[in-house]
Image (tube, rainbow, N blue to C red):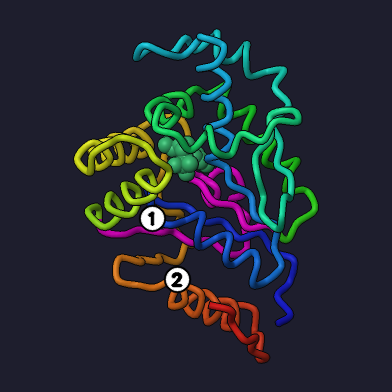
Amino acid sequence: MSIPDIIIAVDGYSSTGKSTFAKLVASEFAFLYLDSGAMYRGVTLAGLEAGVIGDGKIDEAGTVRVMEPLDLHFRRVDGTTQLFLGDRCIEKEIRGWEVSQYVSPVSAVPAIRAWVDDKLHAFAAGGRVIMDGRDIGTTVFPDAQLKIFMTADEGVRARRRYDELVLKGEKTTLEEVAANLRDRDYRDSHRPNSPLRQAEDAYVLDNTHMTLHEELVWILGLLQGKFNILDSPGLSC
Ligand code: DC
């Protein structure tokens, strides 16, 4: 299907399945997938490892100092986009429970947001990108040609995230995970700098009762209508 080289912005609350959806769209329609949250997670991991984050505290100036020289970038590995710190793949570490505890307040620090935004613009310079996060359609790419805002019932989101963590062998409870999601959503939506909010021209995707295949059919209809595309690809899932 002949989709033009557009930027697709996918924003929404924590654990609404943004990255699963964006990865699938990227592979179906040959887009580069970029996970902006991974960048904040990478900075948080580096801060934890350097000892400027920990024991419930974040040394903001120290984290910025640790962040500035970081070589944080995405690489394509086996058909997927993964985050690297220098030559070290940190995909697994950045998804862990400890990073999740600190990443929201770390992402609220203005100097950290500015640094991440610069990197995201550089990574997306080639175009034909689908990027997910909290402020992609409002701040990072306000001119994105297609904006999607994802949401889902809170209980469903907590269960999905909990199942994911358990699969990875993390020890936590459903209540703890639900509390972390609530806390992150609140912080992400109420920070003064670039808060999570729905862009006025975003299309809302509530996937509480949807399968991935239904989500794919939904965006296909959107793309066909918006870009006047008549041919239809066979979808893979
Ligand atoms: O999508 P995620 O859960 O991996 O994101 C981790 C944190 O990063 C999330 O709590 C909010 C923050 N974030 C942000 O502030 N802006 C973005 N564009 C992406 C993520």
Q: Position of residue 7 (x, y in %)?
A: 66, 59
Q: Residue at x 52, y 34 (%)?
A: 94
Of residues 176 and 233, the one nearer the viewer is 176
In the rendered view, does 228 fall on the left or right side of 172?
A: right
User: Quarter of the image containing the N terminus?
Assistant: bottom right
Is 16 above or below relative to 47? below
Q: Residue at x 41, y 52 (%)?
A: 12
Under circle 2, the secondary element is helix
Q: Residue at x 41, y 59 (%)?
A: 150
The amino acid pointed to by label 2 is: Leu
Is 86 above or below relative to 52? below
Under circle 1, the secondary element is loop
Does residue 219 show up magenta in the picture? no
The amino acid pointed to by label 1 is: Thr
Q: Which mark is residue 59?
A: none
Does residue 141 show up magenta in the picture? yes
The residue wearing badge 1 is 16
Q: Residue at x 62, y 58 (%)?
A: 130
Q: What residue range appears in magenta? A: 129-153
Is 38 above or below relative to 6? above
The residue wearing badge 2 is 212
N-terminal of the pair, mark 1 or mark 2, is 1
Q: Position of residue 30 (x, y in %)?
A: 71, 67
Q: Position of residue 2 (x, y in %)?
A: 74, 80
Measure the C-alpha gap from mark 1 to mark 2. Answer: 12 Å
In the rendered view, does 168 fall on the left or right side of 174?
A: right
Q: Nearer the viewer, mark 1 or mark 2?
A: 2
